[in-house]
Amino acid sequence: MAAGGSNIAIYGAIGANLLIAISKFLASFFTGSSAMLAEGIHSLVDTGNGLLLLLGIKRSKQKPDKMHPFGYGKEVYFWSFVVSILIFALGGGFAIYEGIHAIQDPHVIEDPTWNYWVLGAAIVFEGTALYLALKTFNKSRKHKSKNLIKNIIKSKDAATFAVIIEDTAAVVGLTVALIGVFLSQVFGNPYLDGAASIVIGTILLAVATFLAKESKGLLLGESAHDEVIEDIDNLINSKAYVNASNIPQTMHFGPDKILLIVEIDLVDNLEFLEAEKIVDDLRNEIMQEKPKIKEVYIQITSKLN
């Protein structure tokens, strides 16, 4: 997915989260709900995370230099990892702490009207942000019939991936908060509000752990998708002048930048200049067929005259 698509999804998430955070804090102030306070912190953390992802996208566009000859594309992956840490510590950790505190020192929510209005509006805002992120992501998919969830998990666009995961967790968390406030009012049991806060925190911890795992894989250097590697392999071995080739080795240096290294065995009795032209033509064809492949290194192993 192009960075422009990621930006649209992130801007939408930032706008929604900022408005929601303010409204949640107001609701928490007037009602004393710990679940609402936990959700307010959650939305505030998500707002900051969106800004960090935008920073990562901006820094990833820096041109290659002597210290970083393959560019700065992995900046996006680094900041996505930072986001996962913030969700874990500031989001999940604080929500659980606040939930435990609410259970130890419970307060009855006398009038939950504020909570219902804010949670209802927040679900609409977060749902809209999630829809926008999914729509942006879906536009980048070439094969619409494939499983959406599987494609999100396999995505190399860490920024949009993070936004989708965050927004999904937000919608689930809001639903839990709504249920907690409702049950607390119906049964007159303030402990349920604190329990809802702990559940929200647990959800955030799980999301943060999952996002950290995915970001770590991209930071270490994940290969291109299997279908991309298979297409390259088929293209190379379809050439009459290629006897054989090894499995193409690839690595993502960003959502839209792939490094390719492949070793090929050419037919015998080729002149040096002829072999050189074959390699140049093959390199250009690969990059034209797969625009995300920005660097191609082809090693010849045949005997040259």
Image: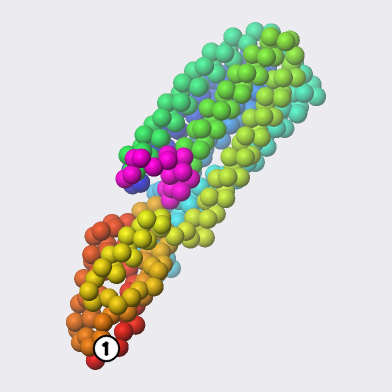
Q: Is residue 107 left or right of residue 287?
A: right
Bin the neighbour count of mark 1 within 10 Å (Cα to Cα): few under 14, some 14-19, many 20 and up.
some
**Can residue 55 be seen here?**
no
Tell me which corner region of the image, top left, top right, bottom left or bottom right, holds residue 252.
bottom left
Q: Position of residue 107 (x, y in %)?
A: 75, 15
**Can residue 189 be seen here?**
yes
Badge 1 marks a residue whose secondary structure is loop
Q: Residue at x 75, y 14 (%)?
A: 189
Q: Nearer the viewer, residue 290 or 147?
A: 147
Q: State the extent of the magenta-drawn residues as a range.
A: 142-161
Q: Nearer the viewer, residue 263 or 297?
A: 263
Q: Residue at x 68, y 10 (%)?
A: 185
Q: Which residue is mark 1?
A: 304
From this view, report whether residue 65 is shown above or below residue 210.
below
Q: Is residue 156 magenta?
A: yes
Colour scheme shown:
rainbow
Amino acid type at image mark 1 = Leu
Q: Is residue 122 magenta?
A: no
Q: Position of residue 78 (x, y in %)?
A: 51, 53
Q: Is residue 154 left or right of residue 170?
A: left
Q: Residue at x 50, y 22 (%)?
A: 123
The quarter in which the C terminus is drawn is bottom left
Q: Position of residue 88 (x, y in %)?
A: 63, 41
From this view, report whether residue 285 is shown above or below residue 24.
below
Q: Nearer the viewer, residue 222 or 159?
A: 222
Tell me which corner region of the image, top left, top right, bottom left or bottom right, holds residue 4.
top left
Q: Is residue 253 left or right of residue 107?
A: left
